[in-house]
């Protein structure tokens, strides 16, 4: 049983004193899809501390415990559980955050052993999402994820859940237990929320179709949480989206129109940050954010280049996007990687953009905080969006309203002359749209 690496943090007194425990194992799940990008224990602990601090608890104790074998009853070894118990008693801890996925049984046993409330990584992230979601859809998605998580945790409830209620009819049997009633109520509520979400999604689909009638390209910001996406969004758009140096500072998709140096208007979309081991409930629940990424003409992958785990964070984001493109119902098309530009943010923390030299044309170093490199980023967006665009001129009959409407809806009309016999229209179209128009009109 390895020694724990322990640090005690002095914080101001708060309503809840918390401990953050990292059971660390160098397991294949700790190695990301990108070869060699192993997530460091110190970085994992710092991330867990950041997550816990973002819900307002006072963190008074942290520890890293090497995990050689996952125990079904407590996850950690008996000696490690005892060491944590002593630290919790000494620090007056009332909530312990375990940065791992705990089964309901493990969670219950650790609560008994430590004499305090225990939440795992999934529960902590769900708590943060519950506090931060602002839109109607975001709130519904979080509630759905919470219910999906809680219905597997009812075994942790108190004894009243085991009481029997009388059955109905002649074959009622011993009746329905309270835990079964609670599970059924949760299932019913989940069905109602899913119906409400479908209505919200249909409304958002109508809004997207309206945007498509004015064919402005969509550029989506993606990246690991706290990589600086919202700060970059504000710097590029002049907006005031909430942006702080904390994990999951903003959760709801935000969109703004901006003008590039060429005069082209684009729609910039800020999305929720990714994180390693994101609860599966939330991957599915936040389909709204994923849909905005799927509809984007360009994907800006914002990376915190100053973070010691930058390579592993990159692999986590690429892994989620890859999962979105796999299977028959994949939200992303197969060639999505061709639409990605890597934005190496926070270059001011590593000596400036000159010190972060992109290896290829699809990466650019910037500092969203100081503005360094943002002009080059705008120029790169201009060049990328113009690369697949062709200019064509067509002669249309004045009565051919359908063709005229199609060009306005799917292209960028840059010139038009209305004559008595014809309408001469010059338009910029993608190669695919030009071929489609010329084959059908």
Image (spheres, helix red, strand yellow):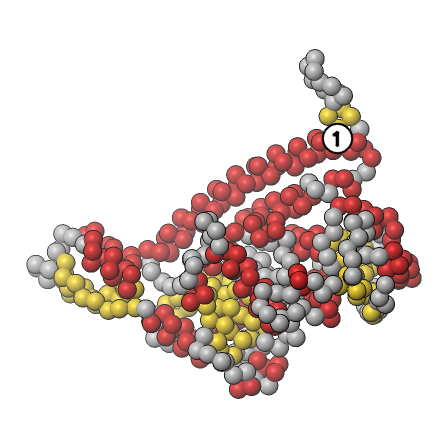
Mark 1, residues whose alpha carbon is within 10 Å: few (<14), some, or many (≥20)? some
For the C terminus, the image quarter is bottom left
**Element under label 1?**
helix
* Residue 382 at least partly seen: yes
Q: Position of residue 223 (x, y in %)?
A: 55, 66
Q: Position of residue 206 (x, y in %)?
A: 40, 48
In which image quadrant can residue 262 be found? Answer: bottom left
**With 378 as the anchor, is 146 left or right in this view?**
right
In the image, residue 172 sits, relative to residue 184, either above or below, namely above
**With 149 as the anchor, is 325 left or right in this view?**
left
Q: Residue 183 or 371: which is nearer the viewer? A: 183
For the N terminus, the image quarter is bottom right
**With 21 as the anchor, is 211 left or right in this view?**
left
> Which residue occupies the extreme left position in the image?
421
The residue pinned by badge 1 equals 178
In which image quadrant can residue 158 be found? Answer: top right
Instruction: Tell me which residue sits at (75%, 46%) in the image.
Output: 104
**With 153 as the anchor, is 225 left or right in this view?**
left
In the image, residue 142 sits, relative to residue 345, either above or below, namely above
Q: Position of residue 164 (x, y in %)?
A: 78, 26
Q: Residue 386 or 63: which is nearer the viewer? A: 63
In the image, residue 113 sits, relative to residue 335, either above or below, namely above
Instruction: Tell me which residue sits at (75%, 30%) in the image.
Output: 178
* Residue 414 at least partly seen: no
In which image quadrant can residue 151 be found? Answer: top right
Q: Position of residue 423 (x, y in %)?
A: 14, 61
Instruction: Tell me which residue sits at (45%, 49%) in the image.
Output: 328
Q: Residue 54 or 89: which is nearer the viewer? A: 89
């Amino acid at each position: 049983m390895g020694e724990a690496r322990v640090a005690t943090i002095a914080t101001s007194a708060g309503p809840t004193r918390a401990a953050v425990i990292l059971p660390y194992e160098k397991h294949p799940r700790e190695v990301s899809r990108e070869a060699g990008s192993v997530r460091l224990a110190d970085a994992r602990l710092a991330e867990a501390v950041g997550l816990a601090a973002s819900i307002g608890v006072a963190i008074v104790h942290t520890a890293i415990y090497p995990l050689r074998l996952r125990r079904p009853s407590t996850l950690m070894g008996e000696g490690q559980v005892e060491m944590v118990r002593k630290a919790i008693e000494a620090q007056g801890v009332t909530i312990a955050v375990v940065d791992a996925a705990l089964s309901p049984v493990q969670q219950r046993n650790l609560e008994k052993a430590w004499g305090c409330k225990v939440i795992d990584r999934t529960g902590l992230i769900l708590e943060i999402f519950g506090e931060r979601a602002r839109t109607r859809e975001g709130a519904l998605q979080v509630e759905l994820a919470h219910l999906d998580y809680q219905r597997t945790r009812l075994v942790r409830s108190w004894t009243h859940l085991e009481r029997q209620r009388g059955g109905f009819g002649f074959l009622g049997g011993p009746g329905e237990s309270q835990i079964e009633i609670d599970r059924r109520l949760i299932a019913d509520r989940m069905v109602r929320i899913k119906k409400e979400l479908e209505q919200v999604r249909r409304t958002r689909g109508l809004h997207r179709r309206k945007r498509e009638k004015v064919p402005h390209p969509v550029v989506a910001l993606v990246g690991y949480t706290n990589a600086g996406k919202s700060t970059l969004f504000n710097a590029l758009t002049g907006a005031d989206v909430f942006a702080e140096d904390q994990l999951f500072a903003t959760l709801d998709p935000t969109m703004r129109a901006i003008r590039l140096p060429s005069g082209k208007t684009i729609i910039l979309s800020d999305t929720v940050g990714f994180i390693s081991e994101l609860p599966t409930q939330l991957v599915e629940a936040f389909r709204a954010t994923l849909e905005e990424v799927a509809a984007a003409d360009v994907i800006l992958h914002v990376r915190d280049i100053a973070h010691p785990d930058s390579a592993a964070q990159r692999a986590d984001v690429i892994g989620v996007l890859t999962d979105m493109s796999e299977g028959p119902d994949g939200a992303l098309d197969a060639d999505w990687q061709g639409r990605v530009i890597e934005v190496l943010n926070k270059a001011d923390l590593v000596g400036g953009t000159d010190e972060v030299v992109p290896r290829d044309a699809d990466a650019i170093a910037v500092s969203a905080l100081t503005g360094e490199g943002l002009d080059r980023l705008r120029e790169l967006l201009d060049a990328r969006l113009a690369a697949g665009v062709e200019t064509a001129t067509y002669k249309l009959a004045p009565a051919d309203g359908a063709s005229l409407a199609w060009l306005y809806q799917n292209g960028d009309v840059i010139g038009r002359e209305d004559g008595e016999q014809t309408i001469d229209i010059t338009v910029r179209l993608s190669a695919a749209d030009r071929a489609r128009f010329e084959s059908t009109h």
